[in-house]
Image (spheres, rainbow, N blue to C red):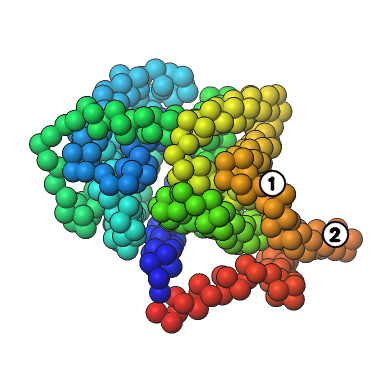
Amino acid sequence: MGKVTISFVWAFIQKFGNTFLSFISNIILARLLLPEDYGAIGMIMIFIVISNTFIDGGFGSALIQKTNPTTKDYSTIFYWNIFFSIGLYIVLYFCAPFIASFYKLPLLNNLLKVLGVVLIINSLSVVQSTQLRKKLKFKECAYATVISSLLAVCVTVFLAYNGMGVWSLVIQQILVSVFSLLLYLYFNKWIPSLVFSWKSLKELFNFGFFMLCSSFLNNLCNNIQGLIIGRQFSSTVMGLYTQSAKLATESSNSIASVVDQVSYPLLVEVKDDNRALEKIIRQLSCNLLFLIFPLMCFLIVVAKPLIVFLFTEKWIDCVPYFRILCLSGIAVTFQGVSYNSIAAIGKSWLLFKWNLVKRIFAMTLIFAGLKWGVYGILWAMVVGAYVISFINMYLVSSQIGYNLGKQFRDIIPIVLIATCPLMLLFLIKGIFEISNEYDCCMGIIYLILYFIISWCLKIEQLGNIGQILASIFRR
């Protein structure tokens, strides 16, 4: 296999190995813990995720985008990340009581003070993981991610079984960071030099700053609904939202993040050739849509039996949340690759400018949706996701020349093939009043119809996926 295919295979193993472990641990922990436990951890994870954005600071992307980064560049970012993460932790530590007061949940004070330690730990592995990604060494990244998750899951389940409650989830996050750091250090035996260059920092900052701002806006907008739900509703409702969002996000991102992870360094390699960029963007986006669209439709059909089977009846109330969030999961297809393509050609300022527009619009929708409660917020998220996707497609059209007409012509056949069987099955279910007990059978029938129609119409993406799978098995 070529370097690109191997990279995809190991990125696939990394993501799906991690997702599988998370999925299994989630099933076990959902039986040992309560929705309010997930609600509590969900409330404070918002602040951890946003803080982690500042630790990377866009410097990871800047180092990958730079043609030949030096040891001085890497060392400078390494020391800067440590310094900045300590500062962030101090801020979080002293803000913890106010955050607990905001949510009216005193327990969050100590939870956040302990969990905040992951910021410092994560800062130590940014350069290590960036170097591996830049060299397309996704095999080592996969080992680090999967092994660290496996070890952390084993400890977490043990702690939850012995009555540690929400603290088991906090310790899980810390252990994942610790084990990941140790493994990255093992696989990438790089030692920083005793040098710090303001010139290097400034040079990387010029690109990384706008990537930081874009990532910050993305994470803020992606988590603002959790902040609102946690503040306006009970911790139980927050727990239901957290669990359904986690399942829906893992389902769509499990494939999309593999493509995103590998696509950025690949796009950087051909950043000066618009034709090559267009070809890669088209192949990645269409292949991604071909897989994610039917997956999300399948999950919408089997949502109720799936939730009950995985998490038991006590989580049944998150079924409608999950179905709505699956709709927004489809939009992920159009976001990652297009975003990476603009970043690859060095237009970080353009990304930031448009991200500002996109996120202000999306957050406005969410606040407007609050009038209709949790469901209003969720539907606002769906609308916002598709608007953001359209803007990303427009940017690709204007900056790379892969115009909107071509993009829509490429995706419409897949959209029609995915939606028509779904509408037909729901129509049949409504006419014949088929019980929800047969949802699993309907889901399987849907997938069979989808792939049969794709085969009959000789959809290009079916052949592409088949070739990738064949090359994997031959290896």
Residue 385 spot, x, y in % from top left: 63, 40
Establish if 392 lies above or below 409: above
Name which residue lies at 16% across and 50% down: 190
Q: Residues within 10 Å of mark 1 (few under 14, many from 20)?
A: some
The mark found on residue 254 in the picture is none
Question: Where is residue 374 drawn, in percent x and y?
Answer: 65, 33
| Left or right relative to 461: residue 133 | left
Q: Quadrant of the N terminus?
A: bottom left
Where residue 75 sits, quadrant-wise, is: top left
Disc sitting over residue 404 in the figure: 1
Is there any visible trace of residue 294 in the rendered image?
yes
Pick the front one: 255 or 106: 255
Q: Is residue 43 left or right of residue 286?
A: left
Question: Considering the image in quadrants, where does the C terminus appear?
Answer: bottom left
**Number of the front mark, 1 or 2:** 1
Label 1 sits on a secondary structure element that is helix
Q: Pointer 1 and pointer 2: residues touching (CB < 8 Å)?
A: no
The amino acid type found where label 2 is placed reads Leu
Q: What is the spatial separation of the Cα atoms under label 1 and label 2, in whole angstroms?
A: 32 Å
Residue 322 visible in this rendered orientation of the protein: no
SS for tag 2?
A: helix
Task: Where is residue 291? Give x, y as percent.
Answer: 60, 62
> What residue is at 26 percent from the left and 44 percent from the top?
69
Q: Residue at x 26, y 38 (%)?
A: 123
Please report whichever mark, 1 or 2, sits nearer to the chain's N-terminal start. 1
In this figure, what is the number of numbered marks? Answer: 2
| Residue ID for mark 2 | 427
Query: For the residue marked with disc 1, what is the amino acid?
Result: Leu
In this rendering, the answer to whether 105 lies above or below 423 is above
